[in-house]
Amino acid sequence: MSNTTKPHTAELLPEVPTQISSILQGGYNHPLLRSWQHERRLHKDMFIFPLFVTDDPEEETPIDSLPNIKRFGVNKLIPYVGTLVKKGLRAVILFGVPLKEGIKDPEGTAADDPEGPVILAIKALKKAYPDLYIMCDVCLCEYTSHGHCGILYEDGSINNKLSVRRIAAVAVNYAKAGANSVAPSDMMDGRIRAIKQGLIDAGLAHKTFVMSYAAKFSGNLYGPFRDAACSSPGQGDRKCYQLPSGGKGLARRALLRDMNEGTDGVIVKPSTFYLDIVRDSAEICSDYPICCYHVSGEYAMLHAAAEKGICDLKTIAFEAHHGFLRAGARLIISYFTPEFLDWLNEPDTL
Ligand SMILES: NCc1[nH]cc(CCC(=O)O)c1CC(=O)O
Ligand SMILES: [Zn+2]
Ligand SMILES: [Zn+2]
């Protein structure tokens, strides 16, 4: 008899003929309307620009696999960044690239060398551009002789306890030098807690933003970065600490882990192939700023495709970055930042 109590399907439908509700184009036939359809628009203050800083102050070297991106010594970095600050650049993330012979060791001592590229760059940038927000990638792989992101046991596996202690010390030293934010990219369990505690002990916790690379996947998209940073692991790979590409559940757990350890924001990396993870992070970390990292391989692929005539660079870059916002990102670490500082002044192509 349940049939009789159920309303007829027709009674549930709104009284609008389908021909009318199926007409959508009235809603996006004009560029202004198309912009109204964006929940979030790209804005200059969403962009964080990666900078590679070497220990030869006068260096300025293009990176073949990373179009338009150069490695800079600190003296060359300052005027270059100045041109971008004038165009509206708000934030950078620093990567140190020590090239001096014999400077790498098993503990990555060079990472927080007071005379090393990162600490010198933090101080010089702060002085030249006091309003520029300075983030530092915190990792050991650019500084260790074995090229891994932590300190190793003799059998080559990660010694978590020593790694975390060392990574926290580096983060605190960057903050002491004036970094506004530290972004640990090593993916070691426990490093966010250790960094937060280190910042508290140093009296810097109230003015340092901890931006964790919470969901960082291993894969094939970091090649050009490793050329730029000269940081390929000598032996083995990073699969024991970076997430496997199918690891959706692990990513969700890593996001929870880093929130529990006290992070202030989270990064998902890479972006294009991991938009479901960006979406998950927006739900799991709904009260935190979500950042996605459009990594070197993604950037290089778009350039390569545009060069082949497969797509238009500006259009595809907007399309990719709109995707990140749609998925839930609020911030984007992007090698396209200098281009967007120009493009966002131009009339909309929406
Ligand atoms: N831990 C170092 C680090 N931090 C950011 C990237 C990659 C960024 C990019 O490809 O643009 C890497 C490389 C890696 O993990 O091998
Ligand atoms: Zn690393
Ligand atoms: Zn490993």
Image (cartoon, rainbow, N blue to C red):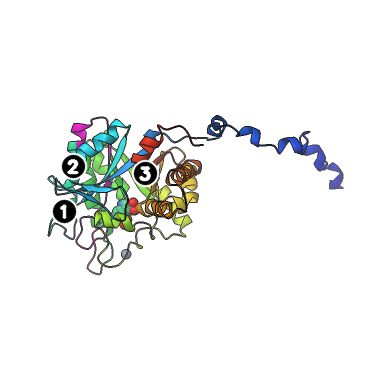
Q: Secondary structure at mark 2?
A: helix
The amino acid sitting under disc 3 is: Phe
Measured in 3D between alpha carbons, the distance from the residue under mark 1 to the one under mark 2, in whole angstroms, is 25 Å
Q: Main secondary structure of the magenta part?
A: loop
Tell me which segment is drawn in magenta.
125-154
User: What's the residue at 24%, 57% (across, down)?
Assistant: 230
Label 1: few (<14), some (14–19) or many (≥20) C-alpha neighbours in 10 Å: some
Give the SS element for disc 3.
loop
Secondary structure under badge 1?
A: helix
Q: Nearer the viewer, mark 1 or mark 2?
A: 2
- Name the quadrant where ligand 3 sits: bottom left
Residue occupied by mark 2? 76
Look at discs 3 and 1 and give the one toward the viewer. Answer: 3
Residue picked out by circle 3: 336
Residue located 87% across and 47% down the image: 1
Q: Earlier in the sequence, mark 1 or mark 2?
A: 2
Which residue, given by chain and number where applicable, does mark 1 sit on?
109
* 165 left or right, relative to 305: left
